[in-house]
Amino acid sequence: MLSGRKYRLALSPEQAQMCEEFANICRSVWNTGLDQRRQYRRRGAWMNYVPQAAELADAKKEHPWLESAPSHVLQQTLKDLGKACRDHGTFKVRWRSKSRWSPSFRFPAGNLITVERLGRKWGRAKLPKLGWVTFRWSRPLGGEVKSATLSRKGGHWFVSFLVSTEETTPEQHAMPNTAVGIDRGVKVAAVTSDGDFHGRPFVTDGETVRYRRLQQRLARSKRGSANRRKTLAAMNRTMGRVTDRRTDFCAQVAHRIKAKNAVVVLEDLKTRNMSASASGTIEAPGVNVAQKRGLNRAILDKGWHRLEIALSNAARYTGTTLVKVNPAYTSQRCSACGFVSEGNRESQAVFRCKAAGCGHTAHADANAAINIRNAGGQPVSVCGDLGATRSMKQQPVSRATGRNL
């Protein structure tokens, strides 16, 4: 099984400068390769990795600064660009801006990487052209190194080793008849159908105030100045701590859930579309922009997509199956009788079924989590069943009887 191991590096000033140089060269290769692919697409032609790698070898003769970085690192950059264009489309792949992109590059040849442990707290790795780099030994390596990725975050450099371990995914979960549904919300990050509420604040009040002041300082600073770089570094350090807390929270929640359940059911949410801006354009301005901006921040703060990734990664170790279901009407459907009505959810936290003779009351998120679990990977019908062939359109409801017309 392939797994990742991330460690914090302790680079010398010369090594840190070399890493910056390698990252800048990779960024230039990425942007040049992307521009070339877009020009070919505009003419109705295609450009892929093979001719670009050949042209990169010729470009080194004209531009000697390209030879500063290892060849296989630049070739890997072109391979990553090709994969991004295949997955997202050539015109949807982003440029790597010097001010917005976090520097990173990958050594793909594991046979050229040597890792040694120096003591209880420290280890070192030998990387092409960088030599021996020291890192904090915070966890066992646990396998054969296949590749190494260096990245900078919050003013520190990290190395991530892709290792091949002897672990294999079990054919069956230890508790095969268990299943759980998870409802992701803006008040509580995750609520399970078992009634467990998983949530915690990721940013403190002091960090919120400090970050707002840093934003004000950034707005007053001159572009390209040293003070602007210092302000951006301070902002990255603050948000880096918040990101680390969110990542740790998602990993812990995923570990607890996958250990107890053979099937984990999630809503198939398009987080990027849900958190898109509603500002619109000058010709067609958006509606309720401030409210939508607050919702976007809440969605991104709770880490919906990060939790999904953590669950898919953790599921490999226990044989847990991750299932996604249609999110339509899961918050409006009664988990006891199947009645669907917009009025069932009285508030963010209160669910009370309006069907005659039911009156089921529960926490709204817990009720939605049960509906998600019961969906079991099939489309959710508003008529109370789970048939994949039934219509997803909501039928009108009689105000007198509370039943479908």
Image (spheres, rainbow, N blue to C red):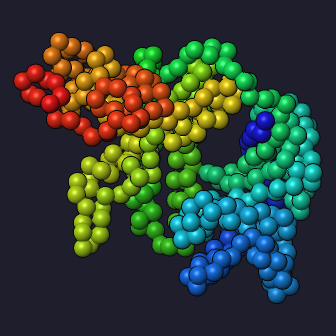
- Asked if residue 399 lies left or right of residue 47, the reply is left
Residue 264 x %, y %: 54, 27
- Asked if residue 70 lies left or right of residue 400, the reply is right
Q: How many marks?
A: 0
Of residues 235 and 262, the one drawn nearer to the viewer in this rendering: 262
Quadrant hosting residue 360: top left
Residue 291 x %, y %: 26, 49
- Asked if residue 293 lies left or right of residue 115, the reply is left
* Quadrant of the rendering where the N terminus is positioned: top right
Name, please, the residue furthest toward the front: 389
Residue 176 x %, y %: 62, 16
Quadrant hosting residue 53: bottom right
Query: On screen, 298 above or below 70?
Result: above
Quick check: can you spot residue 370? yes
At x 41%, y 65%, the residue is: 219
At x 69%, y 21%, the residue is: 172
Of residues 232 and 395, the one drawn nearer to the viewer in this rendering: 395
Of residues 259 and 61, the one drawn nearer to the viewer in this rendering: 259
* Quadrant of the rendering where the C terminus is positioned: top left
At x 22%, y 20%, the residue is: 352
Quick check: can you spot residue 13? no
Residue 285 x %, y %: 24, 66
